[in-house]
Amino acid sequence: MFRNKRLIHQELEQRRELLYRLAYSWCHQPALADDLVQNTMVKALRNAGQLQDTRAIKAWLTRILTNCWYDYLRSKRDMTDIDELAGEYEPRTEDVNERQDIVDRVRQMIAELPDGQRQVITLVDLAGFSYAEIAEILDIPIGTVMSRICRARKALKVALAEYDPRHDFARAKIRRVK
């Protein structure tokens, strides 16, 4: 439990960038990602007394961010389909080299993944959480985490192979990029 307010502020500030990257990877809207992180920080400060193990702050904050994201999705359920949001992201195709083009395409493909798959792949490959931590953050069984990450990676490989048949993405190993 945090006894020093300055300590909690330092811990939150150190993790703000990671939370923003996760939020942005889920929504692909800078302003919304900022709002989600801000809501996360407010809730974390308000509920800092509930955190028993300070070593688990990264997972605790990510769980709060996940709940903020779910709250947002619930509030928009009747107005906006998540698939429409995913289609708004267009990769830059002019004035970029081949590698940047592939990175943009992968980002678009991740945005097109179903919400559950997109969450687990970003939590594993972007944030570096273990499967067990993700299961706790998302409140799902570890087997579900494993199947979602497997389906997400297979979908990405297939989509990459369709995008650029010159490369053998089906045999490539997807590596974590931070």
Image (cartoon, rainbow, N blue to C red):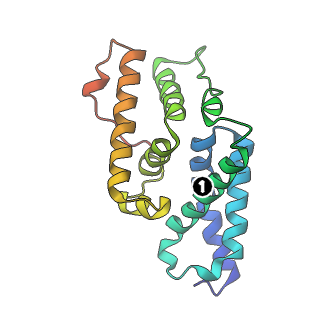
Q: In the figure, is residue 156 to the left or right of 38?
A: left
Residue 164 shows in the view: yes
Q: Quadrant of residue 19?
A: bottom right
What x and y, as percent, mark residue 159?
Answer: 41, 23
**Residue annotated with mark 1:** 19
Q: Position of residue 64 (x, y in %)?
A: 60, 63
**Are there few (<14), some (14-19), or many (20+) residues within 10 Å of tag 1?**
many
Q: Determine the secondary structure under disc 1.
A: helix
Name which residue lies at 57% across and 42% down.
25
**Number of numbered labels in the structure image:** 1
Say which of 55 and 73 sits in front.
73
Q: Position of residue 50 (x, y in %)?
A: 60, 81
| Vertical order, 129 against 99 (above or below) | below
Quick one: which residue is furthest to the left in this view? 171
Which residue: 36% across, 62% down? 132
Image quadrant holding the N terminus, namely: bottom right
Q: Is residue 178 visible?
A: no
At a point 53% along the width and 26% down the height, the residue shown is 104
Q: In this rendering, would 97 be left or right of 15?
A: left
On screen, residue 51 above or below 72 = below
Residue 129 located left or right of residue 94: left
Determine the residue located farthest toward the bottom in the rendered image.
3
Q: Nearer the viewer, residue 166 or 47?
A: 47
- Amino acid carrying label 1: it is Leu
Which x, y percent locates residue 127?
A: 48, 53
Q: Quadrant of residue 167?
A: top left
Measured along the vertical axis of the image, is residue 148 above or below residue 167? below
Q: Name the residue at 63% across, 51% down.
A: 20
